[in-house]
Image (cartoon, grey):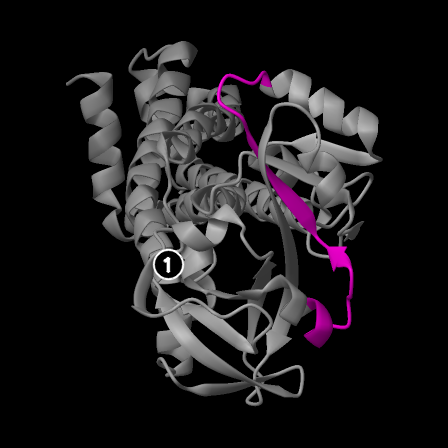
Amino acid sequence: MTLTGFALRNLLRRPARTILTVLSIALAAGTVVGLLALGRGITESVARGLEESGAELMVAQRGATEIISARLPESYGGRIAALPGVRSVSAELYAFAATAEGRQFLLVGWSTGAPSWARAPLAAGRLPRPGARELLLGDVLAESLRLGVGARLELFEEPFEVVGITRFGTAMNRGLGILPLDVLQAAALRPGQVTAFSVGAAEGADQAALRAAIAAALPVTVSDTRELLEGDRNIGILRAVSRAIYAVALVMGGLSLFSTLLMSVQERTREIGVIAAMGWSDVRIIGLIALEGLILGCAGCAAGLVVGLLTSSIFGALPAIGDFVAFTPDLADIALPFLAALPLSALAAAYPAWRAVRLMPAEALRHL
């Protein structure tokens, strides 16, 4: 019998313990997959949402740690538009609002004439009139609020009319409310303020030179959508929490594997003594125990992949989460648990294997 076959037979001799260990590792690995997808999906969802509305370059407050709370004077828009190489400038204001029932969602105000209005994919209704208390709702948001065209919605203690339903392709925009910039500024008590400017470069313009020109003319930062999100404190905190949790999940999976292999050695002391007396070398005994650990780790990670994909699907289907964040694990999210499983399994098997070979065969055979 080969060493691999012997290791598999040992694991199958105790199916309950083996299954529980695999499930424990699967839960840890599945948590890692889901949290990696969450950490990446937060930035990806917001970035794709901004790009879907036509953003090429984003001009934001210099040194701002939170995108939503950042503030710039609306007057900066004219100065940016006057620079060579600028095709369009759109002022945007973001704010959270709550319905009378306490349901919170994100609102964005777009300036009159912004290219974003022309790109808004209307599924029903029309665009809001300038200056009117009218808004568009993303289709997912409209469905969750059970509102349609013509419905009334109270925001900031003022009545607004839903005049259109949009059907964007990204999760963030499908849960977004859109209204004219001046209307949101007045309702949110932020007159003359914007969160950021979306800048479109003229055809053939050097974007690097344009970014440098805007940064030189105004006390702002200029970046693409993904660079802008990298500096956001809230997204950074969510990423840090995700990393911490999946690090804990990896450690817990490793401890589960370690304790299982240690118990396995203690339960099989006589067996190890017998095979040592039969002439098995220390290297071969260590190889057997380490191989069992690798098999458990790989089996647990394979099951964890299924758990992670199912978890991501469930989270993505929840309106409170899936409306804003896309849970779609990529190859890196799936590969990390497998890459971590091999060294972790070998490390977890090293100590019990070392303990096993330290016993003299005669001493091991005296164990019950």
Question: Which quarter of the picture shows residue 103?
Answer: bottom right
**Which residue occupies the foreground of this view, 363 or 118?**
118
Q: From the top left corner, tell me how far across and down residue 180 is, in percent.
A: 57, 65
Outermost residue, left side: 1
Q: From the top left corner, tell me how far across and down residue 18 is, in percent.
A: 30, 45
The residue shown at (36%, 80%) is 149
Which residues fall within the magenta stretch? 185-206
Q: List the residue tagged with mark 1.
A: 316
**Which residue occupies the foreground of this view, 362 or 61?**
61
Say if 220 sits above or below 15 in the image: above
Examine the structure image and report whether residue 203 is included in the region drawn in magenta.
yes
Say if 336 sits above or below 138 in the image: above
| Secondary structure at numbered mark 1 | helix
Q: Locate residue 42 relative to residue 237 in the image: left or right.
A: left
Asked if residue 326 can be seen in this view, the reply is: no
Q: Locate residue 199 relative to residue 122 in the image: left or right.
A: right
The residue shown at (35%, 76%) is 143
Say if 156 sits above or below 368 in the image: below
Q: From the top left corner, tell me how far across and down residue 162 is, in percent.
A: 44, 79
Q: How packed is label 1: few (under 14 Cα within 10 Å), some, or many (20 or more)?
A: many
Examine the structure image and report whether residue 186 is included in the region drawn in magenta.
yes
Asked if residue 269 can be seen in this view, the reply is: yes
Question: Which quarter of the picture shows residue 217?
Answer: top right
Q: Amino acid at mark 1?
A: Gly
**Screen quadrant of the C terminus:** top left
The residue shown at (34%, 41%) is 300
Q: From the top left corner, tell me how far across and down residue 230 is, in percent.
A: 65, 37
The residue shown at (51%, 85%) is 153
Q: Locate residue 171 relative to residue 157 in the image: left or right.
A: left
**Which residue occupies the foreground of this view, 362 or 114?**
114
